[in-house]
Image (cartoon, rainbow, N blue to C red):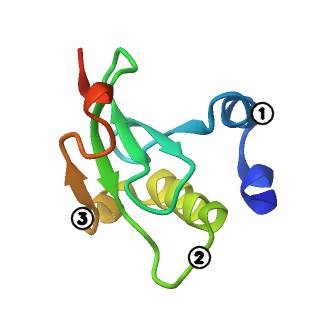
């Protein structure tokens, strides 16, 4: 988690400390994603209004701790979004049914 925290912007770090997640912007589409603490199925794609649209599962190879997985996800989506999503699995509502309301 220490390494992840060093890579977060002040705004991302504040969100992470308060809510257990931070937002990033995809490199090619400018889509907003929210990365939650976890190692799988922890990425939400957000609508323009900030509400969750769907969830993504993309995990680097190896048995990594949550902070390392989240940092890899952040870097991958911010630098090569399309390639990252091409190997990710999309879920319509697997993280939480209520997160997809509205």
Q: Mark 3 packing: few (<14 Cα in 10 Å), some, or many (20+)?
A: few
Residue found at the far bottom of this picture = 62
Q: Quadrant of residue 11?
A: top right
Residue found at the far front of this picture = 97
Quadrant of the frame with the N terminus: bottom right
Q: Position of residue 85 (x, y in %)?
A: 29, 58
Between residues 75 and 69, which one lies in front from this camera angle? 69
Residue beneath disc 2: 64
Q: Quadrant of residue 19?
A: top right
Q: Position of residue 25 (x, y in %)?
A: 47, 39
Tell me which numbered mark, 3 or 2, is placed earlier along the sequence: 2
Q: Mark 2 packing: few (<14 Cα in 10 Å), some, or many (20+)?
A: few
In three-dimensional space, the C-alpha distance between marks 1 and 3, rounded to whole angstroms, equals: 30 Å
Q: Mark 1 packing: few (<14 Cα in 10 Å), some, or many (20+)?
A: few
Residue 86's tag is: 3
Residue found at the far left of this picture = 92
Q: Position of residue 29 (x, y in %)?
A: 33, 40
The correct choice, above or below, for 100 with respect to 85 in the image is above
Residue beneath disc 1: 10
Please tell me how many numbered marks the rendered image carries.
3
Which residue is rendered at x = 27% and y = 69% of the image?
A: 87
Tell me which numbered mark, 1 or 3, is placed earlier along the sequence: 1
The correct choice, above or below, for 55 with respect to 46 in the image is below
Q: Position of residue 47 (x, y in %)?
A: 31, 24
Q: Is residue 25 left or right of residue 1?
A: left
Which residue is rendered at x = 31% and y = 37% of the image?
A: 96
In three-dimensional space, the C-alpha distance between marks 3 and 2, rounded to whole angstroms, equals: 21 Å
Between residues 73 and 39, which one lies in front from this camera angle? 39
């Amino acid at each position: 988690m220490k390494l992840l925290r060093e890579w977060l912007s002040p705004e991302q770090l504040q969100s992470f400390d308060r809510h257990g997640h931070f937002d990033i912007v995809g490199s090619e589409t400018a889509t907003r994603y929210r990365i939650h603490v976890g190692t799988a199925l922890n990425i939400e794609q957000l609508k323009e209004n900030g509400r969750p649209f769907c969830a993504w599962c993309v995990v680097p190879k190896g048995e990594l701790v949550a902070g390392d997985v989240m940092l890899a996800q952040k870097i991958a989506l911010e630098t090569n979004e399309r390639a990252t999503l091409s190997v990710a699995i999309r879920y319509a509502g697997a993280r939480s049914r209520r997160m997809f309301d509205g």
